[in-house]
Image (cartoon, rainbow, N blue to C red):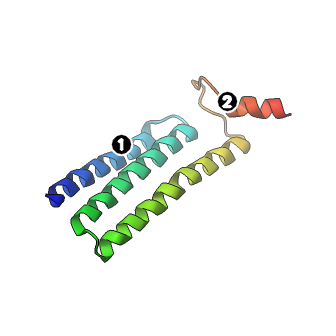
């Protein structure tokens, strides 16, 4: 039973990773691309690792998969935020169709 559930979770993780790759190609600016890649990589890769854990159980490979999941859940969103903030501060403008720019408004209020 765990193998079937593990396979479904792995397929869902692969689908998330695929849609993240499509988002990298289709989205218009660096901020949208970072959002797509960070969320999809986090969910997709963690889904694949969770499926691996369901296959292997509490063996060496299963525990390593859980540790990798924790590492990805802690580092991927933080690194995407740091990259987006660095891009904004270095002068990369958001896409012309961007509706709200709260970070830019906050920077103007500080000055």
Residue drawn at x 75%, y 32% as measured from the top left? 106
Residue under label 2: 102
Q: Residue at x 69, y 34 (%)?
A: 103
SS for dot 1? helix
The quadrant of the rendering that contains the C terminus is top right
Percent of width and height locating residue 85? 66, 45
**Could you tell which of marks 2 and 1 lies nearer the N-terminus?**
1
Q: Give x and y (percent) for residue 87.
A: 66, 45
- Left or right of 107? Residue 103 is left
Position of 95 compared to 18: left or right? right
Q: Badge 1: few (under 14), some or many (20 or more) residues near its Cα, within 10 Å?
A: some
Determine the residue positioned at 41% across, 46% down. 40
Q: Residue at x 27, y 58 (%)?
A: 51
Label 2 crowding class (10 Å Cα cut-off): few <14, some 14-19, many 20+?
Answer: few
Residue 96 place in picture, x, y as percent: 60, 26
Specify the quadrant that holds the N terminus: bottom left
Q: Which is more foreground, mark 2 or mark 1?
A: 2
Kindly report the distance in space between the C-alpha atoms of the residues bearing marks 2 and 1: 27 Å
Are discs 2 and 1 less than 8 Å apart at CB?
Answer: no
Q: Give the mark count.
A: 2
Label 1: which residue?
19
């Amino acid at each position: 039973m765990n193998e079937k559930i593990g396979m479904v979770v792995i397929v869902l993780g692969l689908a998330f990773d695929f849609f993240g790759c499509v988002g990298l190609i289709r989205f218009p600016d660096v901020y949208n691309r970072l959002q797509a890649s960070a969320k999809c990589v986090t969910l997709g890769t963690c889904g694949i690792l969770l499926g691996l854990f369901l296959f292997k159980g509490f063996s060496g490979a299963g525990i390593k998969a859980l540790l990798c999941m924790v590492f990805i859940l802690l580092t991927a969103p933080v690194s995407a935020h740091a990259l987006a903030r660095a891009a904004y501060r270095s002068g990369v403008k958001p896409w012309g169709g961007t509706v709200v720019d709260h970070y830019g408004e906050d920077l103007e209020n500080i000055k």
